[in-house]
Amino acid sequence: MSLFCCSFIFTSPEKRERESWGIIPENAQRQIIGYLNPREKAKFSTTCKKNYELVKNVKTPVYCLQFCPLRYNSKSAEILVNFDEENQNSYSFYFDRNGLNNSLKTTIKSNGLDCVYSPRGLEAEFRLMADLCFQGWVMGSKIELLDIRGDYNGKIPSSLELSTFSFSDKYNRANSAIPAWLDIIQENEHGINFMLMSDHWDKILGHKHFSNPQSTLKLTGYDGIGHEKLENLNSKQIQMNNVKDEQGFNLLVKKWISGGFADTFEWLIVTNVTRPLKTEKLLLDIKIRGLDGSIFEEARPEDLRGSVRHNNPKDSGVQKLLETVRDGRADGERPDIVPTGAACVGGSSDGEAVREDNVVSHQPV
Amino acid sequence: MSSTEQGTSSAAPAEPTTAPESAAAPEVPESFYYVHGKDKVVHKVSAGALQHSALIHGMISNLGYTEEQAKANPFPFENIDGDILQMVVDWCNQHKGKPTPPEDTNLPKQKEKLFDLVLAVNYLEIKELLTYCCKQVAMMVKGKSPEEIREIWMIPTDAEDEAAEKEAKKRAGKEAAGETAAAAGDAK
C-alpha cells in the first residue's frame, strides 16, 4: 500500500474533509484544472465522474482527436487525444468490454499507459462509455484534426471548427454519420481538408463543403467512386481513390476546360486499385493540342500558371499533365495516362492553359 | 511583519502594525481598516492593501465605512481561520501598490493550509492571490498518475460519492419526517 493510502486511512474524517478536493469552490477548481497540462487534465478526468464532467467544461486545445471504437474484435474502444503535433504529448482512453468494475476506474496497461474506464461486461455499456468520453472531448475542445474511425453513436456538437476532418467506417454502413458531421463543420476562409472513406457518395458529395474552392478533398471508395454527383465538386485539390470508371475524371476535366473550377484549383487525381485507367476514356471528347514537351521545356517556369503557385514546378498539376502526356507519347501505345493506374490534371481556370471547344492546349507567352 | 491583538470584534485594537513602510511615503495619511477571523484576532490593514480584495473594497465603497466606524467594527470573517487571515493580510500588505510578480513562492506547502487559503482568498475575491494558490494546488499533482491524484487530493471514488449521496438523502428524509411529526405535535 502506498504512503498516500496510509495517510488517507490514519487521517481523521474532519481533517480528511478539509484536505479534500471537494471543498474547493468550483470556480477555483476550474482555474486549477486550467493550470494542468492536457495529459494531466486527461488523467484527472479519470479520477471520478464529477471531475470528468468538470474537465469537460474547461476547454483544451487538441491537435488531433481520434475515435476508434472497434479495435481488437469489438472488445474495446480507444480514444486517442493528441494535444499537439508530436505524438508524445497524447493520452489514450481505453474502454474494455471485459472490464471488471462498473465504475470509472484507472488501470495501468502493460505498455505503461494509464487508461481508463472499465465498465463491466456488456458491450452496450463499454460502447456507451466510449461514446460519452469522446463526446466530452468533442464538445469541450478546440480541435485541429478530427479522425473518426467507425460509427460514433453519441451526441455531436451543434457546430465545430477544425481544419481537417477524417472519417472512415470499416463496415461501410449506409447510415454513415458523415453528412451529419459535414453539417456542423464550420466553413473557414482557409478551407477544410476532408479525408473520407465511404461508398455512400450520393449522400455526401452534394454538400456545400465540396464546392468550397479553398478546401481539399481526398475521397476513397471502398467499392469505388462513381461518376455521378461529381458536378458539385469545386475544391482546390481533389483526389479520388478507387474510381469505378473513367467518366468522373473526364467530367471534371471538361468542367475545368469550360472554366467550371475556381482560380484556386490546383489538381485532380484519380486512381483505381483494381485496373489501369484507359487514356481514351479519361480524355473522351477532349482534344489535346500543343502539348508538345519541347514547348514546355522552352517555356519559363513562371509561364506555367500551375507552376507559379508551387515552389517546386515539378509538383504542379500542369507539370504532372505534361509528364503524363509526354510519357504517353514516348511510349506510343501506352494505354494508361500514368503507369500506376492514376490520372491527374492541374492548372488554373485562366492563362496559358487554354480551353476552348473541349480542347486543352498550351500557349506559352 | 504585522502584530495583532487578542480580543473581541468590538474591542478597539491597540497598535496593530501591518504594512512595511514604503520608501516613498504618501503625503496624504493612509486610512486603515480592521478585520478579524474565526479567532477574533483583529488585524489592521491599510486601505491600499485592501484594494486587492474585491469583496472588502466593495464593502468599503458601498457601505461608506469611515475609518472610525471601521475601527469600532472590524470586518468579521468568521469562516476564515485566524492564521489563514493573517497570511492573507500579510500578502495584501506585501503587495500593496506593487505589480504582482509572476510567481509567489511564499505560499504554504501543506495541503490543508493551502486549501484553506484557497477558500479564504476565493471568498475575499483576491484574484491575484487566488491565481498563485491555484497554480500551487495544480503543482501538487504534476506528473502524477490518476490514482495518485485521487490520493493526494482525497477525491472520493464514484462508489463513495454514491454512498454519500444516499446517506445525505436518507438523513434529509429523516429530518423531513421529524419536522412533520413535530408540526403535527404542535397542531395537536
Image (spheres, rainbow, N blue to C red):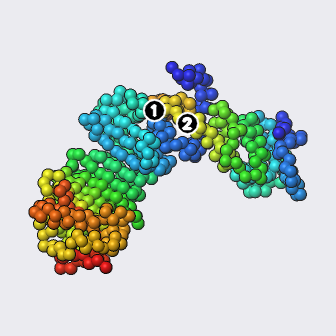
Q: Residues within 10 Å of mark 2 (few under 14, many from 20)?
A: some
Q: CA separation, marks 2 and 1?
A: 23 Å
Q: Residues within 10 Å of mark 1 (few under 14, many from 20)?
A: some
Residue B115 at x, y percent in the picture: 63, 36
Kindly report which numbered mark, 2 or 1, lies closer to the viewer in this rendering: 2
**Relative to A284, residue B86 above or below:** above
| Depth order, front residue of A314/A146 | A314
Query: Please, what secondary structure does the residue beneath circle 2 have?
Result: loop
Q: Chain of mark 1?
A: B
Name the residue located 36 percent from the left edge and 51 percent from the top edge: A146
**Relative to A31, residue A201 above or below:** below
Residue A44 at x, y percent in the picture: 49, 37
The mark total stands at 2
Amino acid at the residue labelled 2 = Lys
Question: Label 1 belongs to which residue?
Answer: B158
Describe residue A73's horizontal placement relative to residue B97 as left or right.
left
Residue B61 at x, y percent in the picture: 75, 57
| Depth order, front residue of B9/A4 | A4
Name the residue located 13 percent from the left edge and 54 percent from the top edge: A275
Residue A178 at x, y percent in the picture: 28, 55
Question: Label 2 belongs to which residue?
Answer: B142
Q: Quarter-wise, where is residue A320 in the image? A: bottom left
| Depth order, front residue of B164/A80 | A80
Describe residue B118's horizontal placement relative to residue A261 as left or right.
right
Name the residue located 67 percent from the left edge and 39 percent from the top edge: B117
| Depth order, front residue of B180/A321 | A321
